[in-house]
Amino acid sequence: MSTLQPVRGTRDILPDEMRRHRVVIDTARALAEQYGYLEMSTPVFEFTEVFKRSLGDTSDVVTKEMYTFSMKESEELTLRPEATAGIARAFISGGLAQQLPLKYFYSGPMFRHERPQKGRQRQFHQIDVELLGVAEPLGDVEVIAIGAHVLDALGVLEKTALELNTLGDPESRRAYRAALVEYFQDHRARLSADSLDRLDRNPLRILDSKNEGDRRVIADAPLFGDYLNQESRDFFDTVKTGLEVLDIPYQLNPRLVRGLDYYTHTAFEFTTRELGAQGAVLAGGRYDGLIETIGGPSTPGIGWAAGVERLSMLLGRAPVAPRPVVVVPVGGGAEEAALTLTQRLRQAGLSIELGFSGNLKKRMKRADRLNARAAVILGEDELARNSATVRDLDTGEQELVSLDVLSDRLARFG
RNA sequence: GUGGCUGUAGCUCAGUUGGUUAGAGCGCCUGGUUGUGGUCCAGGAGGCCGUGGGUUCAAAUCCCAUCAGCCACCCCA
C-alpha cells in the first residue's frame, strides 16, 4: 500500500465501475425524461445557510457531517450533503414560481463526513427527482412510480421492498408530535441515551430506534394514525390507491419518519437486505414546507434521491466495455496507411483501436485483451490490392476485403 | 462520533511455537512463430509484510500509536 492514499471515504472510479455508475445514471435520466423530468444542475457548494435552513440546525447532517469552509469572513460555504436544498434554492433564486409545476432530474456527487462503510462514502453520488408545485397526491404516486420504474429497469426492483408511511399535514403532525413528546417525557427513565437526545432534537425518530429498551417503550406509544385528521387520511388513501392501480406493491411502516417540520404526508423508502446496514437505496417524500422555510413562496414539493454506489452494487452483471475493431499494420510500410484508415473508419462512426507499437503478434494479443470484435490487418500484400484482411476474432474466420467497402463490412460487427 | 475485526506481490490469499534468500494461484512480461490473438509449454519480473515507534541476539509474526478498509451502532442514499 502506498502512503499516497485517497482521502478517507473517497475513491477513484475506474472504467469498470464507471460503467456501472453510468448504467444507473443513464437509465434513470432517460426514464425521468420520459416522465417529463428534465435534467438540471446546481453548484457543488452553497452558502452554509442553505443547508442549515433546509436540513435543520439540529439534524445530524448539519451538526456533524458537513464539509464547511470559508473563503472570506462573509462567505461560509458548504459542499452539498444532498441535492434538494440546492434545487429549492435555485427555484427561489431563479424566480421559477411562475412556471409551476416543475419537474427536475438531477445527478451528481454529494459530501458527508460520516464514518465510511461499504455503500457509505464521504463523497458519494446520487440521482434525484423533484416535483415542485403539485399539492395533489397524484404527484406522490407519479414520483414513486418513477422510482419503481428505474429500479425495475435496472433489474433490482425484486431485491427491494417499498416501505410507505404518512406524516400527515402540519396540523396532524403537530398534534402527534406533542402527544409523542408527552408520552416519552413520562418514560424518560426507560429511554436510551440516544433516544433522550432525540427527544429534544427529533422525537419522531425515537420510533425507529433499534435499542431493545426503547422498543418496549415504543410499543405503547401513541400511534400516528390516531392523530391524522380527515384530510390527511384522504390524501394518504389516494396515494395508496394510486400505487395499487399501478401494481406497485408496498408495505406500511409506521416507524418510517422524517424529523423536520416541513416534511408532510408521504414518506417512502425502497430498501434492500443485500447491503447490510445501508439498506436504503431510494428514498424520498413530500416536503410542502421546505421552500417557504428557506425563504421562498409557499410551494409544495415531493421527490426522492437514490445512491448511485448502492444501486451499482445491486446491479447483477457488470456492463461490458464496448468492443472495438483493431487496425493492425504489418511492417513499417503499412503504418501510414493504417493511420489514415483508422481515422477514416472512426469518422464513419466505428469504434477503432490502433496500437501504437509492436509486431503483428503483439498487436493481435492486445486486440484480444481489448475484447476486440475483429482485427483489420494491413500489410504489403493487402495494400498491393487496395484491400485489408478482416479477421473475426470470435470465430477466427478471415477474408480479404476491399478498402472501398471496408466500413460497410465492419458495420456488421456492430 | 462509539464499539469491534482486518491490513503480506496488480488481484485473491498461505506464511508453522518470533529464527537464514517471504510463498501459491490468477494477472503481467519474454520465448516456443519469419505476417496472426484466445489454449498449451518453458522462463522471468514484481513485496521497506499499510506507516511510525518499541520489546528481542533475532519481528510479517509480540506490544503501542497512527492511517486505511470492513462490521455494528449513530445517521442516511
Image (cartoon, helix red, strand yellow):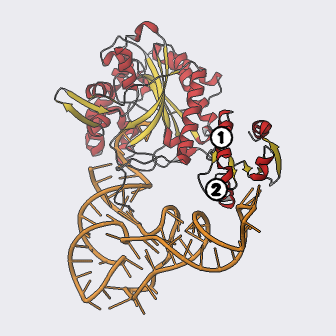
Q: Name the residue under label 2.
A: A366
Residue A188 higher or lower than A44, as above or below: below
Q: Which residue is drawn at 46% across and 29% down?
A: A284
Q: What element carries label 1?
A: helix
- Earlier in the chain: of badge 2 and badge 1, it is 1
Tell me residue A335's x, y (percent). 65, 49
Q: Which chain carries label 1?
A: A
Q: Label 2 vs label 1: CA separation?
A: 20 Å
The image quadrant where one finds the C terminus of chain A is: top right
Q: Tell me if residue A387 can be seen.
A: yes
Q: Mark 2 lies on which chain?
A: A
Which is more toward the observer, A86 or A3?
Answer: A3
Residue A362 higher or lower than A263, as above or below: below
Q: Tell me if residue A272 can be seen.
A: no
Q: Which residue is drawn at 26% across and 36% down?
A: A68
Tell me residue A364's x, y (percent). 69, 57
The image quadrant where one finds the N terminus of chain A is: bottom left
Tell me residue A31's x, y (percent). 60, 26
Q: Name the residue under label 1.
A: A340
Which is more toward the observer, A413 or A354?
Answer: A354
Closer to viewer: mark 2 or mark 1: 1
Within the image, what quadrant is residue A27 found in?
Answer: top right
Q: In this view, does A408 lie to the left or right of A146?
A: right
Q: Which residue is drawn at 55% across and 38% down?
A: A22
Q: In this view, does A412 lie to the left or right of A234?
A: right
Within the image, what quadrant is residue A219 found in?
Answer: top left
Residue A404 higher or lower than B2, as above or below: above
Residue A248 higher or lower than A367, as above or below: above
Q: Is mark 2 on a helix, strand or loop?
A: helix
Which is more toward the observer, A312 or A354?
Answer: A354
Residue type at mark 1: give it: Thr
Query: Callout 2 environment at 10 Å: few (<14), some (14 to 19), or many (20+)?
Result: some
